[in-house]
Amino acid sequence: MNKLNYIFLLTAGVLSLAACKPEVNVPAATSGSADFTRYIAVGNSLTAGYADDGLYREGQLNSFPSIIARQMAEVGGGPFAQPLFSEEHANGSGYLKLNGFDANGSPITAREASKLAVRGEITVPVSPTSTTKVVLFDKYTGDINNYGVPAIKLVHATLGAYGNLNGFYERLLPGNAPANSTAYIDFVTAKPFTFFSNWLGNNDALGYAISGGAGDVLTSKTDFAALYTQVTSMLTAGGQKRGVVATIPDVTAIPYFSTVTIDAILASVKRANPAVAALYVNARTTATDGAAAYAPRVATAADLVVLTFPTSKIGTPVTVAPGATVPYGLHPLAPIENQYVLDANEVTLTKDYINAYNTSIKSIAARTGLAVADMFTFLNTVKQSGLLVDGVTLTSSYISGGLFSLDGVHLTPRGSAVVANEFIKTINATYGSNIPLANVTGYRAVKIP
Protein backbone atom coordinates (compact mmCIF):
# COMPACT_ATOMS: atom_id res chain seq x y z
CA MET A 1 0.00 0.00 0.00
CA ASN A 2 1.48 3.31 -1.09
CA LYS A 3 1.60 6.30 1.22
CA LEU A 4 -1.23 8.13 -0.59
CA ASN A 5 -3.66 5.22 -0.21
CA TYR A 6 -2.75 4.89 3.49
CA ILE A 7 -3.54 8.54 4.14
CA PHE A 8 -6.84 8.21 2.26
CA LEU A 9 -7.94 5.15 4.27
CA LEU A 10 -6.93 6.75 7.57
CA THR A 11 -8.90 9.90 6.75
CA ALA A 12 -11.94 7.87 5.74
CA GLY A 13 -11.78 5.95 9.01
CA VAL A 14 -11.69 9.13 11.07
CA LEU A 15 -14.64 10.56 9.15
CA SER A 16 -16.54 7.30 9.65
CA LEU A 17 -16.00 7.43 13.40
CA ALA A 18 -17.11 11.04 13.48
CA ALA A 19 -20.27 10.13 11.60
CA CYS A 20 -21.07 7.48 14.24
CA LYS A 21 -20.60 9.87 17.16
CA PRO A 22 -23.75 9.70 19.32
CA GLU A 23 -25.87 12.81 19.55
CA VAL A 24 -26.40 14.42 22.94
CA ASN A 25 -29.99 15.55 23.24
CA VAL A 26 -30.31 18.43 25.66
CA PRO A 27 -33.94 18.85 26.78
CA ALA A 28 -35.45 22.16 25.80
CA ALA A 29 -35.75 24.59 28.66
CA THR A 30 -39.32 24.46 29.89
CA SER A 31 -41.30 25.14 33.03
CA GLY A 32 -43.70 22.35 32.14
CA SER A 33 -47.18 22.97 33.49
CA ALA A 34 -45.87 25.35 36.17
CA ASP A 35 -45.27 29.09 35.99
CA PHE A 36 -42.23 30.36 37.90
CA THR A 37 -42.72 34.04 37.04
CA ARG A 38 -43.26 34.94 40.70
CA TYR A 39 -42.09 32.20 43.02
CA ILE A 40 -42.56 32.75 46.76
CA ALA A 41 -41.18 30.71 49.64
CA VAL A 42 -43.24 30.13 52.78
CA GLY A 43 -41.67 28.65 55.87
CA ASN A 44 -39.56 29.06 58.97
CA SER A 45 -35.84 29.36 59.72
CA LEU A 46 -34.79 26.77 57.13
CA THR A 47 -36.56 28.80 54.46
CA ALA A 48 -35.15 32.12 55.70
CA GLY A 49 -31.54 30.91 55.50
CA TYR A 50 -31.00 30.86 59.27
CA ALA A 51 -27.71 29.11 60.07
CA ASP A 52 -25.11 28.83 62.81
CA ASP A 53 -27.77 29.82 65.38
CA GLY A 54 -28.49 33.14 63.72
CA LEU A 55 -30.00 34.94 60.76
CA TYR A 56 -27.34 36.84 58.84
CA ARG A 57 -26.77 38.06 55.29
CA GLU A 58 -24.59 35.23 53.98
CA GLY A 59 -27.05 32.64 55.22
CA GLN A 60 -29.92 34.54 53.61
CA LEU A 61 -28.08 34.77 50.29
CA ASN A 62 -27.62 30.99 50.34
CA SER A 63 -31.08 29.97 51.54
CA PHE A 64 -32.46 26.95 49.75
CA PRO A 65 -35.32 28.96 48.13
CA SER A 66 -32.83 31.48 46.71
CA ILE A 67 -30.88 28.58 45.19
CA ILE A 68 -34.09 27.15 43.72
CA ALA A 69 -34.92 30.57 42.27
CA ARG A 70 -31.47 30.83 40.60
CA GLN A 71 -32.10 27.50 38.90
CA MET A 72 -35.69 28.46 37.99
CA ALA A 73 -34.28 31.46 36.10
CA GLU A 74 -33.04 28.96 33.50
CA VAL A 75 -36.64 28.02 32.66
CA GLY A 76 -38.32 31.41 32.81
CA GLY A 77 -38.32 32.12 36.53
CA GLY A 78 -38.55 35.76 37.57
CA PRO A 79 -36.56 37.80 40.11
CA PHE A 80 -36.42 36.57 43.70
CA ALA A 81 -36.20 39.29 46.34
CA GLN A 82 -35.11 38.43 49.88
CA PRO A 83 -35.39 40.63 52.99
CA LEU A 84 -31.62 40.86 53.30
CA PHE A 85 -29.83 42.60 56.13
CA SER A 86 -27.76 45.51 54.82
CA GLU A 87 -24.01 45.21 54.25
CA GLU A 88 -23.54 47.60 57.17
CA HIS A 89 -25.49 45.27 59.47
CA ALA A 90 -24.69 42.05 57.60
CA ASN A 91 -24.40 39.91 60.74
CA GLY A 92 -28.07 40.36 61.53
CA SER A 93 -28.97 38.67 64.80
CA GLY A 94 -25.41 37.46 65.35
CA TYR A 95 -24.28 33.88 64.79
CA LEU A 96 -21.82 31.21 65.87
CA LYS A 97 -18.40 31.02 64.23
CA LEU A 98 -15.77 28.33 64.58
CA ASN A 99 -12.50 29.51 66.12
CA GLY A 100 -10.73 26.16 66.24
CA PHE A 101 -10.61 22.94 68.25
CA ASP A 102 -9.40 22.17 71.76
CA ALA A 103 -6.89 19.47 72.73
CA ASN A 104 -9.69 16.87 72.76
CA GLY A 105 -10.85 17.79 69.28
CA SER A 106 -13.98 19.56 70.50
CA PRO A 107 -14.97 22.68 68.55
CA ILE A 108 -14.37 26.12 70.04
CA THR A 109 -17.11 28.51 68.98
CA ALA A 110 -17.79 32.16 69.67
CA ARG A 111 -20.71 34.41 68.88
CA GLU A 112 -20.26 37.11 66.25
CA ALA A 113 -21.38 40.35 67.87
CA SER A 114 -20.30 43.02 65.36
CA LYS A 115 -22.35 44.60 62.56
CA LEU A 116 -25.63 43.48 64.13
CA ALA A 117 -29.03 44.57 62.84
CA VAL A 118 -30.64 44.88 66.28
CA ARG A 119 -32.58 48.10 66.67
CA GLY A 120 -33.92 47.54 70.19
CA GLU A 121 -35.95 45.38 72.53
CA ILE A 122 -39.51 45.73 73.80
CA THR A 123 -41.67 43.97 76.36
CA VAL A 124 -44.93 42.67 74.92
CA PRO A 125 -47.90 41.22 76.83
CA VAL A 126 -48.79 37.64 75.88
CA SER A 127 -51.62 37.23 78.38
CA PRO A 128 -53.32 39.28 81.10
CA THR A 129 -50.68 38.07 83.55
CA SER A 130 -47.48 37.58 81.53
CA THR A 131 -45.13 39.38 79.15
CA THR A 132 -42.23 38.48 76.90
CA LYS A 133 -39.21 40.36 75.61
CA VAL A 134 -38.93 40.70 71.85
CA VAL A 135 -35.71 41.68 70.07
CA LEU A 136 -36.39 44.05 67.17
CA PHE A 137 -34.30 44.08 63.99
CA ASP A 138 -33.74 46.61 61.22
CA LYS A 139 -36.87 47.05 59.15
CA TYR A 140 -36.97 45.76 55.57
CA THR A 141 -39.16 47.69 53.13
CA GLY A 142 -38.50 46.21 49.67
CA ASP A 143 -40.26 43.53 47.67
CA ILE A 144 -40.30 40.03 49.17
CA ASN A 145 -40.29 36.57 47.62
CA ASN A 146 -38.70 34.73 50.55
CA TYR A 147 -41.15 34.92 53.46
CA GLY A 148 -39.21 32.58 55.76
CA VAL A 149 -39.59 33.55 59.43
CA PRO A 150 -37.41 31.82 62.05
CA ALA A 151 -39.32 30.19 64.95
CA ILE A 152 -42.77 30.37 63.32
CA LYS A 153 -45.19 27.48 63.89
CA LEU A 154 -48.36 26.65 62.01
CA VAL A 155 -50.45 28.06 64.82
CA HIS A 156 -48.61 31.36 64.46
CA ALA A 157 -49.37 31.60 60.73
CA THR A 158 -52.96 32.66 61.38
CA LEU A 159 -52.33 34.73 64.53
CA GLY A 160 -52.88 38.43 63.96
CA ALA A 161 -50.69 39.50 66.87
CA TYR A 162 -47.70 37.41 65.79
CA GLY A 163 -46.06 40.45 64.25
CA ASN A 164 -45.59 41.74 67.80
CA LEU A 165 -44.12 38.55 69.21
CA ASN A 166 -41.43 37.62 66.67
CA GLY A 167 -38.83 40.20 65.70
CA PHE A 168 -37.94 38.34 62.51
CA TYR A 169 -41.53 38.75 61.29
CA GLU A 170 -41.94 42.24 62.74
CA ARG A 171 -39.08 43.55 60.59
CA LEU A 172 -41.00 42.62 57.43
CA LEU A 173 -44.17 44.51 58.39
CA PRO A 174 -44.73 48.20 57.76
CA GLY A 175 -45.99 48.76 61.29
CA ASN A 176 -44.11 48.58 64.57
CA ALA A 177 -44.70 46.27 67.52
CA PRO A 178 -46.86 46.18 69.58
CA ALA A 179 -49.43 47.57 67.12
CA ASN A 180 -49.24 44.95 64.34
CA SER A 181 -52.31 42.89 63.47
CA THR A 182 -51.50 41.20 60.14
CA ALA A 183 -51.46 37.41 60.23
CA TYR A 184 -48.48 35.82 58.50
CA ILE A 185 -50.53 33.89 55.93
CA ASP A 186 -52.45 37.07 55.04
CA PHE A 187 -49.16 38.93 54.57
CA VAL A 188 -47.74 36.16 52.39
CA THR A 189 -50.77 35.94 50.11
CA ALA A 190 -51.46 39.68 49.81
CA LYS A 191 -49.63 39.93 46.47
CA PRO A 192 -50.29 37.60 43.49
CA PHE A 193 -47.81 34.80 42.86
CA THR A 194 -47.53 31.95 40.37
CA PHE A 195 -45.68 29.25 42.34
CA PHE A 196 -44.86 28.58 45.98
CA SER A 197 -42.87 26.33 48.27
CA ASN A 198 -44.18 25.67 51.78
CA TRP A 199 -42.03 24.17 54.52
CA LEU A 200 -44.04 25.20 57.56
CA GLY A 201 -44.53 22.72 60.41
CA ASN A 202 -40.98 21.85 61.49
CA ASN A 203 -41.17 23.95 64.66
CA ASP A 204 -44.39 22.27 65.72
CA ALA A 205 -42.21 19.29 66.68
CA LEU A 206 -38.71 20.74 66.81
CA GLY A 207 -39.48 23.25 69.56
CA TYR A 208 -40.52 20.44 71.87
CA ALA A 209 -37.57 18.27 70.89
CA ILE A 210 -34.72 20.78 71.29
CA SER A 211 -36.08 21.78 74.70
CA GLY A 212 -35.78 18.17 75.82
CA GLY A 213 -39.55 18.10 76.11
CA ALA A 214 -39.33 20.65 78.92
CA GLY A 215 -39.75 24.04 77.26
CA ASP A 216 -42.39 23.61 74.57
CA VAL A 217 -45.31 21.41 73.55
CA LEU A 218 -46.09 19.37 70.47
CA THR A 219 -48.88 20.84 68.35
CA SER A 220 -51.88 18.52 68.55
CA LYS A 221 -52.30 16.28 65.51
CA THR A 222 -55.85 17.54 64.94
CA ASP A 223 -54.82 21.18 65.11
CA PHE A 224 -51.88 20.56 62.78
CA ALA A 225 -54.13 19.00 60.13
CA ALA A 226 -56.70 21.78 60.40
CA LEU A 227 -54.10 24.56 60.26
CA TYR A 228 -52.20 22.96 57.38
CA THR A 229 -55.47 22.67 55.46
CA GLN A 230 -56.23 26.35 56.13
CA VAL A 231 -52.78 27.53 55.03
CA THR A 232 -52.85 25.34 51.92
CA SER A 233 -56.30 26.60 50.99
CA MET A 234 -55.08 30.19 51.09
CA LEU A 235 -51.95 29.38 49.08
CA THR A 236 -53.98 27.62 46.38
CA ALA A 237 -56.93 30.05 46.32
CA GLY A 238 -57.90 31.99 43.23
CA GLY A 239 -56.74 29.34 40.79
CA GLN A 240 -53.18 29.20 42.13
CA LYS A 241 -52.61 25.43 42.22
CA ARG A 242 -48.90 25.03 41.56
CA GLY A 243 -46.49 24.56 44.42
CA VAL A 244 -44.29 22.19 46.40
CA VAL A 245 -44.55 21.31 50.08
CA ALA A 246 -42.13 19.38 52.26
CA THR A 247 -42.50 16.82 55.00
CA ILE A 248 -41.16 17.32 58.53
CA PRO A 249 -37.72 15.76 59.16
CA ASP A 250 -37.12 13.15 61.84
CA VAL A 251 -35.47 14.97 64.75
CA THR A 252 -33.00 12.12 65.18
CA ALA A 253 -31.62 12.82 61.68
CA ILE A 254 -29.91 16.05 62.74
CA PRO A 255 -26.56 16.36 64.55
CA TYR A 256 -28.16 18.38 67.37
CA PHE A 257 -29.24 15.01 68.79
CA SER A 258 -26.51 12.68 67.52
CA THR A 259 -23.24 14.40 68.40
CA VAL A 260 -23.08 14.34 72.22
CA THR A 261 -24.08 10.79 73.14
CA ILE A 262 -24.64 8.93 76.38
CA ASP A 263 -22.01 6.37 75.42
CA ALA A 264 -19.40 9.04 74.65
CA ILE A 265 -20.02 10.90 77.92
CA LEU A 266 -19.85 7.69 79.95
CA ALA A 267 -16.65 6.59 78.22
CA SER A 268 -15.04 9.94 79.01
CA VAL A 269 -16.06 9.69 82.67
CA LYS A 270 -14.80 6.11 82.94
CA ARG A 271 -11.37 7.11 81.65
CA ALA A 272 -11.01 9.32 84.71
CA ASN A 273 -12.94 7.07 87.10
CA PRO A 274 -13.28 3.42 85.95
CA ALA A 275 -15.60 2.69 88.87
CA VAL A 276 -18.43 4.72 87.34
CA ALA A 277 -21.01 2.31 85.96
CA ALA A 278 -23.78 4.52 84.56
CA LEU A 279 -25.20 7.94 83.88
CA TYR A 280 -28.63 8.95 85.15
CA VAL A 281 -31.30 11.05 83.45
CA ASN A 282 -34.62 12.42 84.59
CA ALA A 283 -36.89 10.70 82.08
CA ARG A 284 -40.51 10.50 81.02
CA THR A 285 -42.04 7.31 82.42
CA THR A 286 -44.29 6.59 79.42
CA ALA A 287 -44.52 7.29 75.70
CA THR A 288 -48.29 7.54 75.95
CA ASP A 289 -49.68 10.85 74.75
CA GLY A 290 -50.75 13.38 77.36
CA ALA A 291 -49.34 14.43 80.71
CA ALA A 292 -46.74 12.09 82.17
CA ALA A 293 -44.58 11.70 85.24
CA TYR A 294 -40.80 11.93 85.19
CA ALA A 295 -38.37 9.90 87.28
CA PRO A 296 -34.60 9.29 87.40
CA ARG A 297 -33.26 6.15 85.73
CA VAL A 298 -30.08 4.80 84.16
CA ALA A 299 -29.45 6.45 80.80
CA THR A 300 -29.31 4.38 77.61
CA ALA A 301 -28.13 4.99 74.06
CA ALA A 302 -31.78 5.62 73.13
CA ASP A 303 -31.72 8.85 75.17
CA LEU A 304 -30.65 11.77 72.99
CA VAL A 305 -28.45 14.42 74.59
CA VAL A 306 -28.71 17.90 73.08
CA LEU A 307 -25.69 19.41 71.36
CA THR A 308 -25.57 22.31 73.82
CA PHE A 309 -25.28 20.12 76.94
CA PRO A 310 -22.39 21.38 79.11
CA THR A 311 -20.55 18.10 79.65
CA SER A 312 -18.37 19.79 82.28
CA LYS A 313 -21.33 19.54 84.66
CA ILE A 314 -20.95 15.76 84.87
CA GLY A 315 -19.58 14.75 88.26
CA THR A 316 -19.85 18.19 89.87
CA PRO A 317 -21.18 18.00 93.46
CA VAL A 318 -24.89 18.60 93.98
CA THR A 319 -26.28 19.17 97.47
CA VAL A 320 -29.23 16.83 98.01
CA ALA A 321 -29.55 17.21 101.78
CA PRO A 322 -27.83 19.26 104.50
CA GLY A 323 -24.22 18.13 104.50
CA ALA A 324 -24.79 15.55 101.72
CA THR A 325 -23.69 15.87 98.09
CA VAL A 326 -23.74 13.51 95.12
CA PRO A 327 -22.05 13.81 91.70
CA TYR A 328 -24.22 15.37 88.99
CA GLY A 329 -25.38 12.87 86.37
CA LEU A 330 -23.78 9.94 88.17
CA HIS A 331 -26.38 9.43 90.87
CA PRO A 332 -30.17 9.01 90.75
CA LEU A 333 -30.61 11.90 93.19
CA ALA A 334 -28.86 14.28 90.75
CA PRO A 335 -29.79 13.11 87.24
CA ILE A 336 -29.15 15.06 84.06
CA GLU A 337 -32.09 17.47 83.83
CA ASN A 338 -34.95 17.21 81.34
CA GLN A 339 -33.88 20.16 79.19
CA TYR A 340 -30.63 18.45 78.24
CA VAL A 341 -32.07 15.12 77.11
CA LEU A 342 -34.81 14.03 74.75
CA ASP A 343 -35.31 10.72 76.49
CA ALA A 344 -36.37 7.49 74.77
CA ASN A 345 -40.08 7.93 75.53
CA GLU A 346 -39.98 11.56 74.36
CA VAL A 347 -38.26 10.41 71.16
CA THR A 348 -41.04 7.86 70.57
CA LEU A 349 -43.71 10.48 71.23
CA THR A 350 -42.06 13.06 68.97
CA LYS A 351 -41.68 10.58 66.13
CA ASP A 352 -45.33 9.58 66.48
CA TYR A 353 -46.40 13.21 66.10
CA ILE A 354 -44.06 13.82 63.17
CA ASN A 355 -45.43 10.74 61.40
CA ALA A 356 -48.96 12.06 61.92
CA TYR A 357 -47.98 15.53 60.68
CA ASN A 358 -46.43 14.03 57.56
CA THR A 359 -49.48 11.90 56.87
CA SER A 360 -51.56 15.09 56.97
CA ILE A 361 -49.12 16.97 54.72
CA LYS A 362 -49.14 14.23 52.09
CA SER A 363 -52.92 13.82 52.21
CA ILE A 364 -53.62 17.55 51.93
CA ALA A 365 -51.06 17.92 49.12
CA ALA A 366 -52.64 15.02 47.23
CA ARG A 367 -56.07 16.65 47.43
CA THR A 368 -54.74 19.87 45.94
CA GLY A 369 -52.34 18.37 43.40
CA LEU A 370 -49.18 19.75 45.00
CA ALA A 371 -45.70 18.28 44.73
CA VAL A 372 -44.27 16.76 47.94
CA ALA A 373 -40.56 16.84 48.75
CA ASP A 374 -40.18 14.01 51.27
CA MET A 375 -37.43 15.49 53.42
CA PHE A 376 -38.22 13.04 56.24
CA THR A 377 -37.16 10.08 54.10
CA PHE A 378 -34.31 11.93 52.39
CA LEU A 379 -32.58 13.12 55.57
CA ASN A 380 -32.99 9.73 57.24
CA THR A 381 -31.34 8.13 54.21
CA VAL A 382 -28.47 10.62 54.42
CA LYS A 383 -28.02 9.78 58.11
CA GLN A 384 -27.93 6.05 57.41
CA SER A 385 -25.89 5.97 54.20
CA GLY A 386 -24.43 9.40 53.51
CA LEU A 387 -24.66 11.15 50.17
CA LEU A 388 -22.14 11.28 47.32
CA VAL A 389 -22.44 14.43 45.19
CA ASP A 390 -19.93 15.24 42.44
CA GLY A 391 -17.28 13.13 44.15
CA VAL A 392 -17.87 14.72 47.57
CA THR A 393 -19.25 12.61 50.42
CA LEU A 394 -21.76 14.37 52.65
CA THR A 395 -23.16 13.06 55.93
CA SER A 396 -25.26 14.24 58.87
CA SER A 397 -22.20 14.34 61.13
CA TYR A 398 -21.54 17.55 63.03
CA ILE A 399 -19.13 19.93 61.23
CA SER A 400 -17.36 17.24 59.16
CA GLY A 401 -20.55 16.13 57.42
CA GLY A 402 -20.85 19.33 55.41
CA LEU A 403 -24.64 19.61 55.49
CA PHE A 404 -25.43 21.12 58.88
CA SER A 405 -24.20 24.38 60.33
CA LEU A 406 -22.68 24.97 63.76
CA ASP A 407 -26.04 24.89 65.55
CA GLY A 408 -26.57 21.26 64.50
CA VAL A 409 -30.10 22.00 63.23
CA HIS A 410 -29.89 24.37 60.28
CA LEU A 411 -28.11 24.00 56.97
CA THR A 412 -24.78 25.18 55.61
CA PRO A 413 -24.90 26.77 52.12
CA ARG A 414 -23.90 23.36 50.78
CA GLY A 415 -26.71 21.74 52.74
CA SER A 416 -29.11 24.33 51.33
CA ALA A 417 -27.99 23.42 47.80
CA VAL A 418 -28.61 19.73 48.51
CA VAL A 419 -32.10 20.48 49.85
CA ALA A 420 -32.81 22.83 46.94
CA ASN A 421 -32.00 20.01 44.53
CA GLU A 422 -34.42 17.66 46.28
CA PHE A 423 -37.16 20.26 45.88
CA ILE A 424 -36.20 20.78 42.24
CA LYS A 425 -36.31 17.04 41.49
CA THR A 426 -39.79 16.88 42.98
CA ILE A 427 -40.99 19.94 41.04
CA ASN A 428 -39.62 18.55 37.77
CA ALA A 429 -41.20 15.15 38.33
CA THR A 430 -44.60 16.60 39.22
CA TYR A 431 -44.95 19.42 36.70
CA GLY A 432 -42.87 18.18 33.77
CA SER A 433 -40.37 21.02 34.06
CA ASN A 434 -36.61 20.63 33.62
CA ILE A 435 -35.14 23.06 36.13
CA PRO A 436 -31.41 22.28 36.20
CA LEU A 437 -29.91 21.12 39.49
CA ALA A 438 -27.61 23.39 41.46
CA ASN A 439 -23.88 22.71 41.60
CA VAL A 440 -23.62 21.53 45.21
CA THR A 441 -19.82 21.76 45.37
CA GLY A 442 -20.05 25.43 44.45
CA TYR A 443 -21.42 26.17 47.92
CA ARG A 444 -19.39 26.06 51.12
CA ALA A 445 -19.76 23.74 54.09
CA VAL A 446 -18.77 24.82 57.63
CA LYS A 447 -16.01 27.42 57.59
CA ILE A 448 -12.88 25.86 59.09
CA PRO A 449 -10.40 28.46 60.43
Image (cartoon, helix red, strand yellow):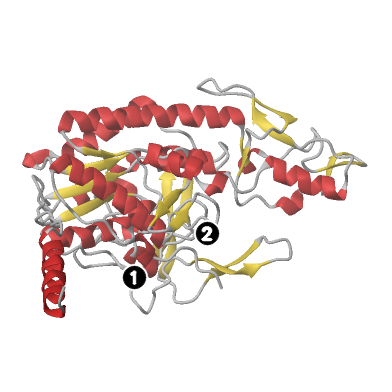
User: Looking at the picture, how far across and down is residue 245, in whole percent?
Assistant: 26, 41
Label 2: how many residues lie within 10 Å, few (<14), some (14-19) or many (20+)?
A: many
Pointer 1 residue: 85
- Above or below residue 357? Residue 26 is below
Residue at 51% across, 55% down: 401
Residue at figure coordinates x 26%, y 38% from the top left: 372
Front position in the image: 399 or 63: 399
Instruction: State which mark lies toward you, 1 or 2.
Output: 2
Q: Amino acid at mark 1?
A: Phe
Kind of element beneath mark 2: loop
The answer to whether the residue labelled 1 contacts the one labelled 2, judged by CB atoms less than 8 Å apart, is no
Which residue corresponds to mark 2? 406
Label at residue 308: none
Q: Does the image show residue 207?
A: no
From the top left corner, tell me how far across and down residue 110 is, in percent: 59, 68
The residue lying toward the viewer, choosing from 284 and 41, is 41
- 405 to 317, vertically: above or below: below
Q: Is residue 116 visible?
A: yes
Taking the image as shown, residue 428 lies to the left or right of residue 253, namely: left
Please name the residue shown 83% across and 36% down the image.
Answer: 277
Looking at the rendered structure, the secondary structure element under dot 1 is loop
Which residue reaches farthest front?
1
Residue type marked 2: Leu
Q: Relative to 364, does residue 77 appear above or below in the rendering?
A: below
| Sooner in the amino-acid sequence: mark 1 or mark 2 | 1
Q: CA distance from mark 1 to mark 2?
A: 20 Å
Q: Residue at x 42, y 58 (%)?
A: 391
- Relative placement, left or right, of 110 versus 186 is right
Residue 4 place in picture, x, y as percent: 11, 79
Mark 1 Cα shell of 10 Å, populated few (<14), some (14-19), many (≥20):
many
Image quadrant containing the C terminus: bottom right
